[in-house]
Amino acid sequence: MPSYKLGELFCGPGGLALAALNARILLDGKEFEDEKNMPFRFEHEWANDYDKSTCDTYIRNICPDSPLSVYCGPVQSLDIQNLSPIDGLAFGFPCNDYSIVGEQTGINGKFGPLYTYGINVINFHTPLFFLAENVGGLSNANEGNAFKKILSDLENAGNGYNITTNLYKFEEYGVPQKRHRIIIVGFRKDLGLTFKVPKQTHLNNFKTVSSAFNDPPISIDASNNERTRHPDLTVERLNHIPPGQNAWYDGLPEHLKLDVKGARLSQIYKRLHPDEPSYTVTGSGGGGTHVYHYAEPRALTNRERARLQTFPDNYIFSGSKENVRKQIGMAVPPLGAQIIFESILKTFAQIPYPSIEASWKNLEQMDGNL
């Protein structure tokens, strides 16, 4: 069965979906096929998200011919038993309670338990594989107990899965952004397959911000490219902050320094450095967290943010400028995830590929790695 039907929970604007649909096995410049001359590919089957604009973005770019395959509403209201059969499940369950910039309530928070809806889908549909994604802070939530609970639940879901858990540093996979995410890939145990973490493609050759913006240049008429109007004081402050520095730069004049007591977040009014990958793009924007251009005293446009997330310029986001910013910031970089999906295809096809040791080998060895 070389074509695998993919279902998604918490699909966002389609970062994982785009990665999966673009995934290919290429051998000697040709697409690999099975004995029936069928290529190994993924197909969109259904998806779910709660936000209307996000769903509109997904439909517009991923499945314009089948809009009813996207169920827009709370995951709690999703009729799991009536979803069409799938071969794989992808779900980047909400990270709000695991992120280092949040309150880190973990599995006890409002969003922390939502991963269980992925477990429910796996229990009922028993897909051949799953891919689950979350922030690096997941490993430390609730003193590491939440991580072990989630991995145990995934390993024992359905009829059991061989799981591979790794912290991916996406800048090492060709993404022009320092974005670190835990991705768990599971193959159903009866298949006798175990996923291997693909070797980094850009370990010593990071893609830089300037190359992301200028190769090729972004058209001024590109979609989602509206600029933010800043107060004069913000523009003046940015003009005094060099590339790579933030609001705590020592060279700032006194009247431009922020009167902040306590923790000083490094991304506040931080300008990108043109010769390095970006720092992590998030869905926030208030309080000086927009992500700021290295050559101009302004926040990035959403199209520039999308470039850092490796969405192509013809990927059009629906919704207000603020909503689009959140969509982009919460997405998985398609280019980085595509390498993982291609490795999943190679695992099915039993084609060897360069790999590295996973960050966490198994549950028994986790205590020493948290």
Image (cartoon, grey):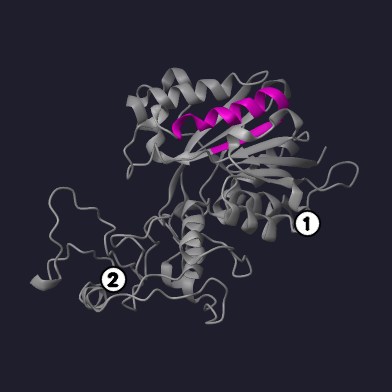
Q: What span is colored magenta in the figure?
A: 111-132
Determine the residue positioned at 47% across, 63% down. Answer: 308
Callout 1 crowding tier (Cα within 10 Å): few <14, some 14–19, many ≥20? few
Kindly give the residue lying farthest to the right in the view shown: 36
Determine the residue positioned at 64% across, 69% down. Answer: 314
Task: Indicate the position of residue 203 as horizontal and vertical percent values.
Answer: 45, 53
Q: Report the disc number at residue 165.
A: none
Q: Is residue 174 visible?
A: no
Q: State which mark lies toward you, 1 or 2.
A: 2
Q: Tell me which numbered mark, 1 or 2, is placed earlier along the sequence.
A: 1
Q: Is residue 79 visible?
A: yes
Q: Secondary structure at mark 2?
A: loop
> Amino acid type of disc 1?
Lys
Q: Report the disc number at residue 30.
A: 1
Task: Indicate the position of residue 342 as horizontal and vertical percent values.
Answer: 66, 47
> Which image quarter holds the N terminus?
top right
Confirm or deny contact between disc 1 and disc 2 (CB under 8 A): no
Give the left or right position of residue 24, taking residue 253 as reference: right
Residue 83, quarter of the rendered image = top right
Q: Report the disc number at residue 243.
A: 2
Callout 2 crowding tier (Cα within 10 Å): few <14, some 14–19, many ≥20? some
> Amino acid type of disc 2?
Pro
Q: Secondary structure at mark 1?
A: strand
Along the viewing direction, whichever of 176 and 233 lies nearer the viewer: 233
Determine the residue positioned at 42% across, 21% down. Answer: 365
Task: Indicate the position of residue 186 as horizontal and vertical percent values.
Answer: 61, 30
Give the left or right position of residue 236, taking residue 340 as reference: left
Give the left or right position of residue 315, taking residue 104 as reference: right
Along the viewing direction, whichever of 198 and 40 lies nearer the viewer: 40
Query: Where 5 falls versus 272 (above or below)?
Result: above
